[in-house]
Amino acid sequence: MNREPQIRRVTRVEACLRPLDWEWPKHNREFIAENWKRRTAGKPQMFNGRVLLLQDVAFEQDLCRGTYFEVDYADFVAWIDKGYPDPAIANGFAMGALRGSDGAFICGVMGNGTTNAGRVYFPAGTPDCEDLRSEGSVDLAGSLIRELEEETGLSESDYHVDDEWIIVQRWPTIALLRMVTLPVMAEEGAAKIRANIAAQHEPELQDVRIVRGKEDIDPERMPLFLQSFFAWVFDQR
């Protein structure tokens, strides 16, 4: 497992689906069932759908190429909660690094009904079957847009998405980020998102948080890859 996050820029990201007969869930059915029961207690909105995990990632000059396979969400959550016991597998997801016109970033605080309640992230999600295309590709750019809308209520007309990707890799976590910039300052953007959250029936976020500099990095609530991303960005300013 790679403990030191690696960050690189690429101009293209390509992803495809390739079937994989994952052995780990077969040998851990009892733990998976018990873990899912514990995880979903009091959280009726959680359901065991199908998600896509990485079985391979490769870099070729300015290209990042990922190969995914399909699994039950309960298997995925149990694999995380068990401490990532299969080192050959990774969670690779697209993420919109949302920021205002003043350069301050806007993160979401995950709602109590979610798997990562209280954690602070940019809008994101492990890709799922909605991101599959007919030719067998995985649309990570589309996943980024979809997750932004689902979590914040923002539509594509509300922001600009950079073409460049920033890959933050700390195996078994690989975040594929794009800068997403609002035409308004972060405070105004945060207010709009809060209003959108308040209008949602089952919001995924409970609040948003503005990150202006290293002093706003929260080691207790932010995952290490996100802390590394912020440190990297602010070091360049």
Image (tube, rainbow, N blue to C red):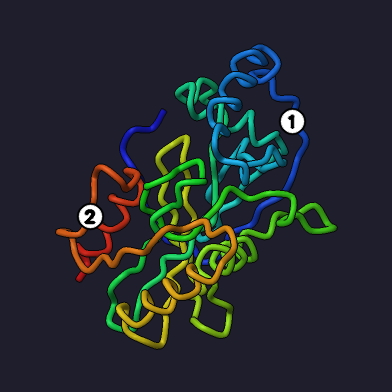
Residue 231 is drawn in which quadrant? Answer: bottom left
The spot of residue 87 in percent (x, y) is 51, 25
Mark 2 sits on what residue?
217
Q: Name the element at disc 2.
A: loop
Residue at image coords 66%, 12%: 27
How many badges with numbers are in the image? Answer: 2
Tell me which numbered mark, 2 or 1, is placed earlier along the sequence: 1
From what the image shows, is residue 165 above or below residue 8? below
Residue name at image x 51 percent, y 46 percent: 113
Residue at 49 percent of width and 81 percent of height: 160
> Where does the image place residue 81, in percent across and percent down from the top left?
48, 26
Q: Which residue was labeled with disc 1?
A: 20
Q: Residues within 10 Å of mark 1 (few under 14, many from 20)?
A: few
* Dot in front, 2 or 1: 2
Cα separation, mark 2 vs mark 1, equals 37 Å
Asked if residue 141 lies left or right of residue 50, the reply is left
The kind of residue on which mark 2 rests is Ile
Question: Of 60 and 76, which appears nearest the observer?
Answer: 76
Which residue sits furthest bottom? 183
Q: Amino acid at mark 1?
A: Leu
Which residue of the protein is positioned furthest toward the left in this rendering?
215
In front of the other: 191 or 7: 191
Q: Quadrant of the N terminus?
A: top left
Residue 146 horizontal/vertical position (percent): 62, 65
Residue 77 vertical position relative to residue 63 in the rendered view, above or below: above
